[in-house]
Image: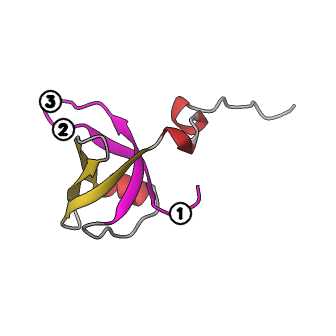
Amino acid sequence: MPEPQHAQTTIDAKADDDLVPATVVFWNNRFGFARTDRGGQVYIGAAELARAGIARLEIGERIFFEVRPATHKRKPWAARIRLSGATA
């Protein structure tokens, strides 16, 4: 009997063209913030960075990510983070 095929999640199915460009403005090895080219600020968590396979960030570094909605009166947060110039 063949293995069941799992449908891709909405996140996996999105093209990298949908990712938002931004610049890291703060990073302390646990969390940080990036300012998007659109002018907003987004929270970056270490767990999401590890999930993306990124060991560290530098202030001023360019990144791309998917913006997730804010919860509990906090800033929106970054998911599916990619470094500028990195291939998906």
Mark 2 to mark 1: distance in Å?
26 Å
Kindly identify the residue that appears in the image at 15 percent across and 29 percent down: 72
Disc 2 or disc 1, which is closer to the eye?
1
**Above-or-below relation of 88 to 76:** below
Mark 3 to mark 2: distance in Å?
9 Å
Image disc number at residue 86: 1
- Could you tell me which quadrant the N terminus lies in? top right
Residue 34 rendering spot, x and y as whole percentages: 25, 53
Which residue ends up furthest to the right in the rendered image?
1
Residue under label 3, please give it: 72
Assign a secondary structure to mark 3.
loop
Front-most of residues 9 and 87: 87
Front-most of residues 36 and 4: 36
**Above-or-below relation of 65 to 67:** below
Residue under label 2, please give it: 75
Region rendered in magenta: 61-88
Kindly identify the residue that appears in the image at 30 percent across and 57 percent down: 23
Callout 1 amino acid? Ala
Image disc number at residue 5: none
Horizontal relation, residue 63 to residue 42: left or right: right
Assign a secondary structure to mark 1.
loop
Disc 3 or disc 2, which is closer to the eye?
2
